[in-house]
Image: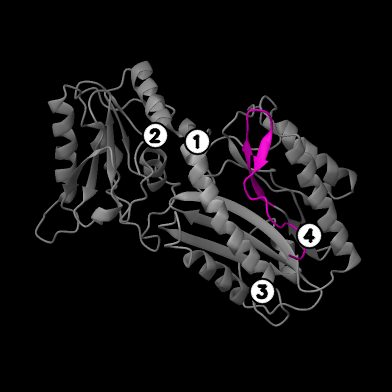
């Protein structure tokens, strides 16, 4: 784990063009993006200065064996009982580095909004951050805070990011296979979801995998009709002749995939099979159109046209896809009506057309993660997307 050269060049350009003294990162997905480091507690802070090596501030309780190479590591006493205010020590440590390098009179930049972020390794409970965190960080420079488009870094993945995402998708392939092999009548949605999640968890320790978690949401029969509004797993038992939808979010080593498959317990009714075939065609047509220079709305239109011409356009009520990789849903424009953003090599996007409705008695969505290449695209999740394996 260390900062790759392309990402370092991107950060250096932002610092120079914006006249900044340093950048600050602390969200788990930001630390994966910058360092390839997925923190355990979720309160590590990376100071990336315009001069000198980066400094990573980590709580004293952070496991040492997960710390990244290529940066100086300083600790602060979060979680230590006799420390009255660990955050004051963190602020003082950052200030000391800035002053020591003569950067404290230049503005700082970071993503100021609170909210969306990927979880840390302690996904059940990320440590709370001070409510005045961004205000206090802004005060570490005499010139305060200056905005910059740091979230734009999410859109185009480096070659190192793509290699990491390939590991994620290899584990996801095992999860998808487990899903298909567990579609027997009598099994519950919760039971199928548990098997899928266990497969991913058990990949931890396999070659190239030090962290693997999944959130599998499984809906069957009439429950799939609501999958365009929400995904959730219930205790419903699978019945013969039903479709079963898996919405899979999976994180491996801090890199995310977002995949949907629909399988069957046994032969579907012809009307439901027809819906599946339309969605499959819409996805294939859209993926075939993906290449650099094409607008995102054009790709959305490709899938929407297929579904509309089949008479189900009113039942496809969401965009075709979104960026993915550092989060389950990366920030940035997606494949949707009105999105003028042009595709670039290195973008990774979901392609997920769907048809859902209580009136038709089912819901179908097929979702894959697609990498835009120099001359077209490549499906990272290119494994079974049929009704049976």
Q: Which residue is mark 4?
A: 357
Q: Is residue 309 left or right of residue 362?
A: right
Circle nearer the N terminus (1, 3): 1
**Discs 4/1, front:** 1
Tell me if residue 234 can be seen.
no
Q: Helix, strand or loop at disc 2?
A: loop
Relative height, residue 171 to residue 233 (above, below)? above
Mark pair 1, 3: CA separation: 35 Å
Give the residue at x 53% y 56%. Answer: 250
Q: In this rendered view, identify the residue nearer to me: 175 or 359.
A: 175
Circle nearer the N terminus (1, 2): 2
Quarter-wise, where is residue 71 in the image? Answer: top left
Q: Report the quarter where the C terminus lies.
A: bottom right
Q: Which residue is mark 1?
A: 159
Q: Is residue 114 left or right of residue 315?
A: left
- Please provide percent x and percent y for residue 44: 28, 47
Quarter-wise, where is residue 277 in the image? Answer: bottom right
Contact between labelled residues 2 and 1, with CB atoms less than 8 Å apart: yes
Task: Say if the magenta span includes residue 381.
Answer: yes
- Please provide percent x and percent y for residue 174: 59, 62
Using a 10 Å C-alpha cutoff, classify the residue at mark 2 as few (fewer than 14 neighbours), some (14 to 19) or many (20 or more). Answer: some
Q: Helix, strand or loop at disc 4?
A: strand
Q: Helix, strand or loop at disc 3?
A: loop
- Please provide percent x and percent y for residue 207: 45, 57
Using a 10 Å C-alpha cutoff, classify the residue at mark 3 as few (fewer than 14 neighbours), some (14 to 19) or many (20 or more). Answer: some
The stretch of residues the image draws in magenta is 367-389
Give the residue at x 13% y 33%. Answer: 96
Task: Say if the magenta span includes residue 11.
Answer: no
């Amino acid at each position: 784990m260390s900062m790759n050269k392309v990402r370092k060049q991107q950060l250096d350009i932002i610092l120079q063009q914006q006249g900044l003294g340093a950048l600050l990162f602390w969200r788990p997905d930001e630390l994966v993006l910058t360092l390839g480091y997925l923190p355990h507690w979720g309160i590590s802070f990376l100071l990336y200065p315009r001069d000198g090596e980066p400094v990573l501030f980590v709580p004293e309780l952070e496991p040492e064996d997960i710390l990244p190479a290529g940066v100086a590591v300083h600790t602060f006493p979060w979680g230590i009982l006799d420390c009255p205010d660990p955050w004051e020590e963190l602020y003082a440590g950052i200030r000391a580095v800035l002053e020591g390098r003569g950067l404290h009179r230049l503005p700082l930049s970071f993503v100021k909004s609170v909210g969306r972020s990927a979880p840390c390794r302690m996904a059940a409970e990320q440590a709370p951050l001070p409510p005045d965190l961004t205000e206090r960080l802004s005060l570490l420079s005499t010139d305060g805070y200056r905005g910059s488009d740091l979230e734009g870094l999410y859109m185009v993945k480096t070659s190192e990011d793509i290699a990491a995402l390939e590991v994620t998708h290899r584990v996801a392939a095992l999860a998808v296979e487990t899903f298909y092999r567990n579609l027997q009548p009598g099994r519950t949605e919760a039971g199928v979801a548990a098997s899928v999640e266990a497969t991913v968890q058990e990949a931890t320790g396999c070659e190239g995998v030090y962290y693997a978690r999944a959130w599998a949401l499984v809906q069957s029969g009439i429950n799939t009709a609501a999958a365009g509004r929400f995904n959730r797993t219930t205790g419903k038992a699978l019945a013969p002749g039903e479709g079963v939808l898996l919405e899979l979010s999976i994180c491996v080593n801090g890199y995310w995939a977002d995949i949907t498959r629909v399988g069957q317990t046994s032969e579907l009714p012809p009307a439901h099979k027809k819906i599946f075939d339309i969605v499959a065609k819409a996805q294939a047509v859209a993926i075939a159109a993906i290449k650099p220079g094409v607008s995102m709305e054009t790709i959305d239109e490709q899938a929407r046209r297929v579904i509309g011409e089949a008479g189900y356009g009113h039942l496809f009520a969401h965009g075709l896809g979104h960026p993915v990789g550092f989060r389950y849903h990366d920030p940035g424009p997606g494949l949707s009506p009105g999105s003028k953003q042009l595709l670039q090599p290195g973008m990774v996007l979901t392609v997920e057309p769907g048809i859902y409705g209580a009136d038709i008695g089912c819901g179908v969505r097929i979702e894959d993660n697609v990498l835009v290449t120099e001359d077209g695209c490549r499906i990272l999740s290119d494994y079974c997307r049929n009704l049976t394996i």
